[in-house]
């Protein structure tokens, strides 16, 4: 059972209809979804599924087996019948905040070029990203850099390329701030800024805002040492 990932094509879709492929307390699998499944440090979406005579609150969304996405019910919630058509309603305010946060992480990467990213977590109030970085910039310099990139309102776009195309364009691979995964066949690239001189370009399966101006006021609040070269950078959304 594979779930079509509508959020990969339109991160702004807030509601849609889908068919129930299976339903159990472990999760409801639909033929398609706008709910982002937890991955890459971005939390899964929450919201509700509604059908004739029922409603199920979605507490989290995670990846299941073989391309299925599991919409986790809140404890004791009624489950939709298999084969039913359900209306999906996303908790949009929460998701949009996560999109703003997630996009700001890409901007942070662009300010620390060449440093490997060793971990990260996107949150509603606070996010963090770990860099392999012996000499970190100051939090003031990073905050200033981020705010300038937000003010410039750079466009954010996605494209899909297959591995053969990447191999045929070594220049593109060099431009990428993160190396793409191998073996998936096709890679989703997220570009911030102009086609020929992007601010950031990297493979990513997350959800992003359309333009960096939508991020709002972002501040780097802290840099923490996590091991000899590992630096943890904390970001906070102020509005
Ligand atoms: Zn991303």
Image (cartoon, rainbow, N blue to C red):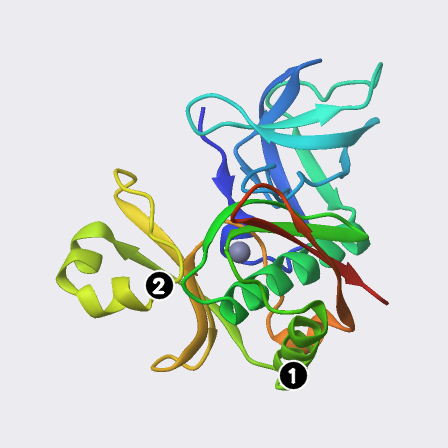
Q: Residue at x 53, y 23 (%)?
A: 64
Question: Secondary structure under badge 2?
Answer: loop
Residue wearing tag 2: 176
Q: Is mark 1 within 8 Å of ligand 1?
A: no
Q: CA distance from mark 1 to mark 2?
A: 21 Å
Residue wearing tag 1: 148
Report whether 82 appears left or right of 169. Answer: right
Local packing at callout 2 (Cα closer than 10 Å; few below 14, some 14-19, many 20+) is some
Q: Nearer the viewer, residue 6 or 116?
A: 116
| Above or below 109: residue 79 | above
Question: Secondary structure under badge 1?
Answer: helix
| Above or below 223: residue 198 | below
Sequence-wise first label, 1 or 2: 1
Q: Residue at x 33, y 50 (%)?
A: 180
Residue 2 image offset from top left, x and y in percent: 44, 30
Res 51 seen here: no
């Amino acid at each position: 059972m594979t779930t079509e990932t509508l959020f990969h094509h339109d991160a702004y879709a807030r509601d849609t209809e889908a068919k129930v492929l299976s339903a159990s307390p472990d999760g409801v699998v639909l033929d398609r979804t706008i709910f982002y499944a937890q991955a890459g440090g971005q939390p899964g979406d929450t919201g509700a599924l509604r059908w004739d005579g029922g409603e199920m609150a979605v507490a989290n969304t995670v990846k299941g087996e073989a391309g299925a996405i599991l919409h986790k019910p809140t404890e004791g919630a009624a489950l939709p019948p298999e084969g039913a058509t359900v209306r999906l309603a996303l908790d949009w305010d929460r998701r949009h905040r996560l999109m703003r946060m997630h996009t700001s992480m890409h901007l942070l990467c662009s300010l620390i070029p060449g440093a490997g990213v060793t971990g990260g977590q996107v949150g509603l109030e606070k996010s963090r990203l770990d860099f392999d970085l012996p000499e970190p910039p100051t939090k003031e310099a990073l905050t200033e850099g981020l705010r300038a990139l937000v003010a410039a309102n750079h466009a954010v776009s996605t494209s899909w390329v297959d591995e053969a195309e990447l191999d045929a364009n070594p220049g593109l691979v060099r431009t990428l701030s993160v190396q793409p995964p191998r073996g998936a066949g096709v890679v989703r690239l997220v570009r911030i800024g102009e086609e020929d001189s992007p601010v950031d370009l990297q493979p990513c399966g997350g959800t992003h805002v359309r333009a960096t101006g939508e991020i709002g006021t972002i501040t780097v609040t802290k840099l923490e040492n996590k091991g000899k070269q590992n630096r943890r950078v904390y970001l906070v959304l102020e509005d």
